[in-house]
Image: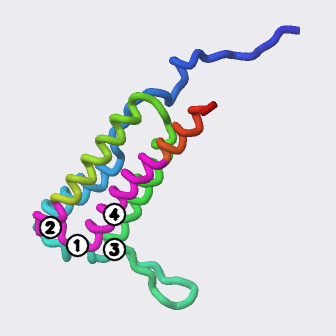
Amino acid sequence: MTDSTVFIPPERRPGRGSFIPPLLLIPLIAYNFFAFLFMGGSPAGWSGQLLTIPMVSGVAWSLTSGDLMLVVGLVCLFLEVLKSTNTGRASVVEHMLSTLVFVVFLVEFLLVGAAASSVFFILMMMAIFDVVAGFTVSITGAGRDVTMN
């Protein structure tokens, strides 16, 4: 009998050291795209209903464009937290870029009228949670890799 174990060298493992830009750029770009092109720069446009579904309880559930944007942001935040578990040189750059994305959110929230909405504020909070969670997960993971005698 032969051993059929396959060994992948550490430098060739998938997912290690590969650079992926901050995913919260997706809702940031999408928010600006829709706010300026379709809503005329008005933050009130995010309350427009996209669809209404009658529920068994007899009440209609409505999904607004702002709700949908927040769901996209939550999915991106979840994937960002998963990305932060990777350690390596690329993760440091990813953390710096995530911080830059938060700064862009903050500056836009303070200076741009179209960003003065609860939807944008919650997306901005997702960006700061991404920064804090990314650094926390990385530091915790790095602490486990180092052994003190």
Query: Callout 1: 10 Å neighbours few (<14), some, many (20+)?
Result: some
Q: In the rendered image of this protein, does residue 51 appear above or below residue 128?
A: below
**Nearer-N-terminus badge (1/4):** 1
**Nearer-N-terminus badge (3/1):** 3
Q: In this figure, which residue is indicated by the disc labeled 3?
A: 64
Q: Could you tell me if the residues under marks 3 and 4 are in contact, i.e. CB atoms within 8 Å?
A: no
Q: In this figure, which residue is indicated by the disc labeled 2?
A: 114
Residue at point 19%, 76% (across, down): 44
Query: Callout 3: 10 Å neighbours few (<14), some, many (20+)?
Result: some
Bounds of the magenta segment:
108-136
Residue 113 on the magenta span: yes
| Front position among marks 1 and 4 | 4
| Front position among marks 3 and 1 | 1
Q: In the rendered image of this protein, does residue 48 appear above or below residue 70?
A: below
Quadrant containing the N terminus in the rendered view: top right
Q: CA distance from mark 3 to mark 4?
A: 20 Å
Q: Could you tell me if the residues under marks 3 and 2 are in contact, i.e. CB atoms within 8 Å?
A: no
Q: Is residue 80 visible?
A: no
Q: Could you tell me if the residues under marks 1 and 2 are in contact, i.e. CB atoms within 8 Å?
A: yes
Q: Specify the quadrant of the image occupied by residue 111.
A: bottom left
Q: Can you tell which mark lies on residue 18?
A: none
Q: Please state which amino acid type lies under the numbered disc 3.
A: Thr
Q: Please state which amino acid type lies under the numbered disc 2.
A: Ala
Q: In this figure, which residue is indicated by the disc labeled 1?
A: 117
Q: In this figure, which residue is indicated by the disc labeled 4?
A: 125
Quadrant containing the C terminus in the rendered view: top right
Q: Please state which amino acid type lies under the numbered disc 1.
A: Ser
Q: Is residue 9 visible?
A: yes
Query: Callout 4: 10 Å neighbours few (<14), some, many (20+)?
Result: some
Q: Please state which amino acid type lies under the numbered disc 4.
A: Met
